[in-house]
Image: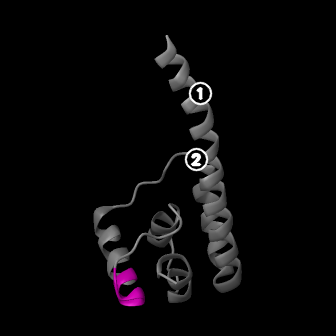
Amino acid sequence: MKLHVAFCIFLAVIIPISALHSENELKELEAVLEKFQPEALEVLEELKKEQIEPLVPQNCGSKIRLKILGTCGEVTECKSGYLAPLACRTHLNEKVFQELCCPN
């Protein structure tokens, strides 16, 4: 019983933190797009309306990894989960990748 209560408390804390983290990622992505590529904001809005995590086709994922490697000099973890599906649907310029993927 104690374990069940502890697990419920864990979920009650982790889920809001996770939602806040993804909300912060989304705000950061929107700010970068607004600054460097505002026309991509419309595509991002379409992705957000889908309300499921968009899948990235394997061939597109490979192209994105190569783009990050060419831009950053190494493959790194990007700051937004929406970046890959967005990049598969619209051409993103290097500045967007630099801001969200390259180590500072």
Front-most of 92 and 18? 18
Residue at image x 50%, y 88%?
94
The residue under label 1 is 9
Give the main secondary structure of the magenta stretch: helix
How far across and how far down the image is residue 7, in percent? 51, 25
- Report whether 88 appears left or right of 6: left
Which residue is found at the position 70% from the left and 74% from the top? 31
Callout 1: few (<14), some (14-19), or many (20+) C-alpha neighbours within 10 Å? few
Q: Are marks 2 and 1 in contact (CB under 8 Å)?
A: no
Which mark is first along the chain, 1 or 2?
A: 1
Q: Which residue is mark 2?
A: 18
User: Where is 99 relative to 28, above or below?
Assistant: below
Q: Quadrant of residue 30?
A: bottom right
Residue 48 % position (x, y): 62, 54
The residue segment tinted magenta is: 68-74
> Disc 2 to disc 1, how far (Cα)?
14 Å
For badge 2, the amino acid type reads: Ser
